[in-house]
Image (cartoon, grey):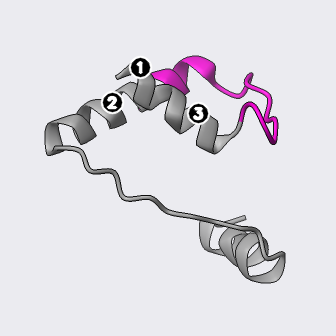
Amino acid sequence: MSLASRYTWMVELENHHVEQWRLMISDDEKESLLSHYVIESEGIGLDLPYHTLFQNCTTEVFRILDGV
């Protein structure tokens, strides 16, 4: 399923709540954050289980932000 199809299904058809937050960080911080996130993601692979409250895309972003 393409990203566009998944968006249409989750957000438009299923009314899944989505928020986007603009981070007020410098370009160097953005680069560091992205590099750190890619390295972490490769290390985790597909072994990380999804949990609605404790381990999801939002909690992972905050975990990465705390680690940079």
Residue 19: where, in percent of width, then height? 57, 64
User: On the rendered structure, is 65 left or right of 42?
Assistant: left
Tag 2: amino acid = Ser
Residue 11 belongs to the span the image colors magenta:
no
Which residue is rendered at x = 74% and y = 22% of the image?
A: 47
- Main SS category, magenta section: loop
Between the C-alphas of marks 3 and 2, the distance is 14 Å
Which residue is rendered at x = 72% and y = 32% of the image?
A: 55
Residue 6: where, in percent of width, then height? 71, 68
- Frontmost of labels 2 and 1 is 1
Q: Quadrant of residue 4?
A: bottom right
Q: Earlier in the sequence, mark 2 or mark 1?
A: 2
Residue 39 belongs to the span the image colors magenta:
yes
Q: Is residue 49 above or below residue 1?
A: above
Which residue is rendered at x = 33% and y = 51% of the image?
A: 23
Q: Is residue 9 above or below residue 31?
A: below
Give the magenta-colored segment's residue range. 38-55
Q: Earlier in the sequence, mark 3 or mark 1?
A: 3
Residue bearing the label numbered 3:
60
Residue 18: where, in percent of width, then height? 63, 66
User: On the rendered structure, is 26 left or right of 16?
Assistant: left
The label number, if any, that marks residue 35 in the structure image: 2
Residue bearing the label numbered 1:
67
Secondary structure of residue under mark 2: helix
* Label 3 CA crowd tier, 10 Å (few <14, some 14–19, many 20+): some
Tag 3: amino acid = Glu
Looking at the image, the residue that sits furthest to the bottom is: 12
Q: Earlier in the sequence, mark 3 or mark 2?
A: 2
Secondary structure of residue under mark 3: helix
Which residue is rendered at x = 60% and y = 43% of the image?
A: 58
